[in-house]
Image (spheres, coloured by chain):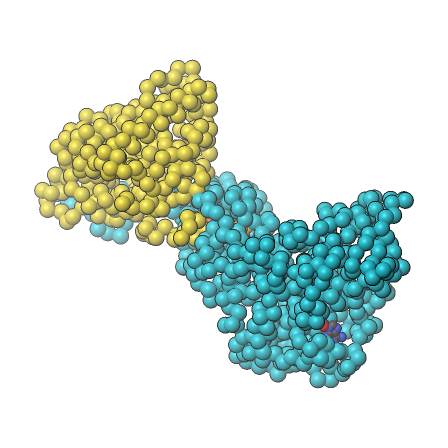
């Protein structure tokens, strides 16, 4: 048979009409008035992730059991998944498209699996050394992340830390039942294996002026956090312990028990951690918060855990006086009501006149906010109020050699935001050290909503849940309360992911095209439309499971081209 | 492993990357019949000759002297697909041609109605051919006239809403099976792996093999061209068009477990059912339910156990590739 498949006419047959050419001569693409455009989109999880981790790619690789590929994708945006899997509030999960079908992907559990799997494997020294030197001030998540990405790019990195051990809030504040010290230690070991140098017990400013660092380094990245604690600002405030001080004491083993009723003033993460820690030390914790539960800045899930632990809450309550009475503490409380919204958009609490009443307790801890200390910084990088200023995209400041990030800039925020600052600064510093111009800002693609997902292709499947200590046990111990999942579970959970907006080369668009007008390329290349023959039926648009193909009016395409 | 295959499917590895249907054919946008040919030829490869009676496909193949297939195709008269294929087979055998499969390819009108005598006699003689009926459920090429494959209640040009025809779709697979042919099966364009498996099975058998292939027609079904696959998928998922195969006319295997999608969901996608009342839709549902009971009975008699396979619910009916083997 010839190439066209049409046999030659045997000459002893009577003459029959026999086709001599094929239909490829018909450019049926000219019938089209709408055009399928194949272009990848952003998944909602990716957009919501504070680190913009490539979650669909991670899930795709892990669903195959390919831990190295999944890990490489993840580490590119998140150097410490074992940490974030334990403490990040995971906004990524909130908007997960799968949540509008059955249950959202348990991204946290998958991240935890990967983070733990990689924990002791990470940390190879860089292949090349640039010989350029960077000082990182502060070893919280921002500093550690910056060190990770700078070192990976071949720069010499030294971290200067005021405390005896590195980790910042990860070591001194976040309680062990949420983030065991071994996890942090293992991450720091990984950084040491990479060749990051730690100089602990050095406070920049007092022990060594910031300017001195410059003599030995090309660039300085400072991420010293927000450690200054606000007091109650009321008579008797000296009777209240400061929240961070208390948590640090517990983590360092200096405080080992508590008893009676202890009031915790505040509504943020620190207040919740203080209260839950008090329960574990043997006390009864009562959180006093001046607004309602709805306005609490603490991570919602943590508030639920605190309630389950037995922590009680008194909302719309503010202490105005603290006094020692017969070996215990008497707080005078006023009842509040919510008034007009303030700058944060939350309604401002205002006292109800004449509502003073007293509250007897055995101790009280104030956790009402932390502020950054900026005295060690040159005044060129401070604003009129004395707050440090830096470019959000790069951490760059008015001083070319000085980059800043993390809680120091934002005030108390999250671990993931701090990591994001560290990563962005590291990438910017790297470009600077290489003499390259600053990168164009990362632009996110349009998002795929649930409407773009063809649910026919996905079976309902239950969400994998992480094991957890029962409440009765966990409230008595500092052992980690949430457990991990195994490889099979992680692969199952990853396989539930729709992989919104990222082409998996499932080949649906190709398989269902009546006009053979979709071309599959090499293994993982995104398919292409053959415009000469595509009639614009739109089948591929509907059958793409993950919302990558859009129908665009042909007239509009022409205008744009 | 859990069943959430969907994020991670395999890229239809069972479908040949080779194309035997050229683009530039002149089927309408979203034509199920064109896709049907493309998918079937991927499974047969090029050792096949196609015999085609009058039908939309006569047009789709292109006007003389163009031709859309990379394999030979013989145009023949409307009522003669099975007879002409019989002759072609005999001719190939007479000249000692290298192994070639003869494939009759006819529409529902050409199969259920006008070609019925020819197909019945070829089946009765167990002629060695694969006969594919691509079913778009009406005489589409001449303007959507009702055939005996048109489902109960569907609008056509000859059965407008005011003059419906109170007859069910003819059970063509049952009729062919009753000829005790070696292999008969149903499949659709929305289930390429089921389709490839069945064509491959048919290729491996000698004698008369019949494939009933549901191929939605956007203008005839009054369905948006982009929803052609969705319509065929729902036809299966709702039980309107169950996937099954019959060996030697006696052993029936359902390739799916009980449908759970309401028939109304299938009907509402298509304008040809738009005029139906709720009672009429309920009547269709009861016919579908009754037919499922019959098929399931037959499957039980054959296998001694219920069918397992793609749960055909939209609740993740996935691909039939998820079929769990029996036993
Ligand atoms: C109790 C508590 C619970 C929290 N829980 C969570 C949570 O569950 N999830 C979450 O995402 N976030 C949580 N956070 C917030 C999170 O810990 C911080 O946002 C994050 O650690 C900020 O990182 P950073 O690197 O900017 O600063 P830090 O972690 O504060 O680190 C700064 C480091 O710099 C050092 N340093 C300061 N000044 C100097 C100096 N002059 N010289 C040298 N070193 C210096 C400090 O000792 C410290 O080690 C919590 C915070 C607290 C306090
Ligand atoms: C003997 C004869 N009667 C009528 C026709 C006109 N005709 C050509 S195609 C066709 C419809 C075929 O219907 P079907 O077999 O269902 O195929 P479809 O067009 O729907 O694909 C008709 C009636 C004909 N070609 N020959
Ligand atoms: S289904 Fe997967 S890709 Fe889509 S939002 Fe959820 S986690 Fe992200
Ligand atoms: S249908 Fe599959 S192969 Fe085609 S664009 Fe969508 S994900 Fe990629
Ligand atoms: Mg027809």
Q: Chain coloured cyan: which letter?
A: A
Residue at position x 62%, y 60% in the image: A476
Quadrant of residue A236 within the rendered picture: bottom right
Residue B63 vs A280, above or below: the answer is above
The residue at the far top in this view is B162
The residue at the far bottom in this view is A216
Residue at position x 38%, y 17% in the image: B164
The image position of residue A160, as x and y in percent, is 70, 78
**Of residues A397 and B245, the one drawn nearer to the viewer in this rendering:** B245
**Of residues A270 and B50, the one drawn nearer to the viewer in this rendering:** A270
The image position of residue B95, as x and y in percent, is 10, 44
The image position of residue B37, as x and y in percent, is 31, 41
Residue at position x 84%, y 56% in the image: A330
The residue at the far front in this view is A326
In this rendering, position of residue B163 left or right of residue A146: left
Residue at position x 77%, y 82% in the image: A208
Chain B: what color? yellow
**Of residues A445 and A208, the one drawn nearer to the viewer in this rendering:** A208
In this rendering, position of residue B76 left or right of residue A413: left
In this rendering, position of residue B169 left or right of residue B93: right
Residue B226 vs A525, above or below: the answer is above
Taking the image as drawn, is residue A243 in sight? yes
- Report the number of numbered marks: 0
Quadrant of residue A183 within the rendered picture: bottom right
In this rendering, position of residue A77 left or right of residue B8: right
The image position of residue A298, as x and y in percent, is 70, 54
């Amino acid at each position: 048979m010839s190439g066209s498949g049409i046999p030659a006419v045997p000459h002893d047959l009577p003459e029959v009409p026999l086709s001599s050419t094929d239909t490829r001569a018909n450019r049926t693409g000219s019938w089209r008035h709408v055009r399928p455009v194949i272009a990848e989109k952003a998944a909602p999880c990716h957009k919501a992730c504070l680190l913009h981790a490539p979650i669909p790619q991670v899930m795709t690789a892990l669903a195959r059991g390919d831990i190295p590929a999944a890990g490489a994708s993840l580490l590119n945006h998140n150097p410490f998944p074992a940490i974030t899997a334990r403490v990040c509030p995971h906004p990524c999960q909130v908007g997960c498209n799968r949540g509008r079908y059955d249950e959202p992907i348990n991204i946290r559990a998958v991240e935890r699996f990967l983070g733990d799997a990689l924990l002791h494997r990470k940390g190879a020294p860089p292949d090349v050394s640039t010989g350029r030197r960077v000082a990182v001030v502060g070893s919280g998540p921002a500093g550690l992340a910056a060190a990770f990405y700078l070192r990976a790019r071949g720069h010499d990195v030294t971290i200067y830390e005021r405390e005896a051990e590195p980790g910042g809030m990860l070591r001194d504040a976040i309680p062990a039942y949420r983030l065991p010290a071994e996890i942090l230690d293992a991450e720091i070991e990984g950084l040491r294996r990479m060749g990051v140098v730690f100089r602990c017990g050095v406070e920049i400013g007092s022990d060594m002026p910031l300017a001195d660092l410059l003599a030995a380094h090309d660039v300085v990245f400072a991420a010293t956090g927000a450690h200054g604690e606000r007091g109650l600002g009321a008579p008797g405030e000296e009777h209240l312990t400061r929240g961070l001080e208390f948590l640090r004491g517990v983590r360092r083993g200096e405080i080992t028990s508590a008893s009676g009723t202890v009031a915790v003033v505040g509504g943020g993460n620190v207040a919740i951690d203080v209260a839950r820690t008090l329960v574990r030390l043997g006390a009864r914790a009562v959180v006093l918060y001046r607004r309602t539960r709805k306005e609490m800045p603490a991570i919602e899930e943590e508030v639920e855990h605190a309630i389950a632990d037995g922590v009680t809450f008194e909302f719309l309550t503010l202490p105005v006086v603290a006094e020692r009475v017969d070996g215990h503490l008497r707080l005078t409380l006023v009842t509040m009501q919510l008034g007009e919204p303030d700058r944060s958009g939350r309604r401002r609490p205002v006292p109800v006149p004449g509502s003073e009443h007293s509250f007897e307790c055995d101790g009280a801890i104030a956790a009402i906010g932390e502020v950054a200390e900026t005295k060690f910084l040159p005044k060129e990088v401070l604003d009129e109020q004395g707050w440090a200023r830096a470019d959000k995209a790069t951490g760059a400041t008015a001083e070319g050699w000085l980059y800043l990030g993390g809680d120091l800039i934002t005030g108390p925020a999250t671990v993931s935001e701090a990591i994001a600052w560290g990563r962005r600064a590291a990438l910017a510093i790297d470009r600077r050290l290489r003499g390259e111009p600053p990168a164009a800002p990362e632009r996110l693609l349009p998002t795929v909503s649930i409407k773009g997902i063809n649910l026919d292709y996905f079976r309902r499947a239950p969400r994998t849940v992480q094991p957890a200590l029962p409440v009765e046990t966990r409230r008595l111990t500092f052992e980690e309360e949430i457990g991990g999942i195994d490889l099979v579970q992680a692969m199952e959970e990853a396989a539930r992911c729709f992989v919104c907006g990222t082409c998996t080369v499932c080949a649906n668009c190709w398989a269902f095209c009546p006009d053979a007008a979709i071309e599959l390329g090499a293994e993982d290349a995104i398919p292409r439309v053959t415009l000469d023959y595509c009639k614009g039926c739109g089948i591929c648009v509907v059958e793409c499971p993950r919302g990558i193909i859009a129908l665009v009016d042909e007239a509009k395409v022409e205008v744009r081209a | 492993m859990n069943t959430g295959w969907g994020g991670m499917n395999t890229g239809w590895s069972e479908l040949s990357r080779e194309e035997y249907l050229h683009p530039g054919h002149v089927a309408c946008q979203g034509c199920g019949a064109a896709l049907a040919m493309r998918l079937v030829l991927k499974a047969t490869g090029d050792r096949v000759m196609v015999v085609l009676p009058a039908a939309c496909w006569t047009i789709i193949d292109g006007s003389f002297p163009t031709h859309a297939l990379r394999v030979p195709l013989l145009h023949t008269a409307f009522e003669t697909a099975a007879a002409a294929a019989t002759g072609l087979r005999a001719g190939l055998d007479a000249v000692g041609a290298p192994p070639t499969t003869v494939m009759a390819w006819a529409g529902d009108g050409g199969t259920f109605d006008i070609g019925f005598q020819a197909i019945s006699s070829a089946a009765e003689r167990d002629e060695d051919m694969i006969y594919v009926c691509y079913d778009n459920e009406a005489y589409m090429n001449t303007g959507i006239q009702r055939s005996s494959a048109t489902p109960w209640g569907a609008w056509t040009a000859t059965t407008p809403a005011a003059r419906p025809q109170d007859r069910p779709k003819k059970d063509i697979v049952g009729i062919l099976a009753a000829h005790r042919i070696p292999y008969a099966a149903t499949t659709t364009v929305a289930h390429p792996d089921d389709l490839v498996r069945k064509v491959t099975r048919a290729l491996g058998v000698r004698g008369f093999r019949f494939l009933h292939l549901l191929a939605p027609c956007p203008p005839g079904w009054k369905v948006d061209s982009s929803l052609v696959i969705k319509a065929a998928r729902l036809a299966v998922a709702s039980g309107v068009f169950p996937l099954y195969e019959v060996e030697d006319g006696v052993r029936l295997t359902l390739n799916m477990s009980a449908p759970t999608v309401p028939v109304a969901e299938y009907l509402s996608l298509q304008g040809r059912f738009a005029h139906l009342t709720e009672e009429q839709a309920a009547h269709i549902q009861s016919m579908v339910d009754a037919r499922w009971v019959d098929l399931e009975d037959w499957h039980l008699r054959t296998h001694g156990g219920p069918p397992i396979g793609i749960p055909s619910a939209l609740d993740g009916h996935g691909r039939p590739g998820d079929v769990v083997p029996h036993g």
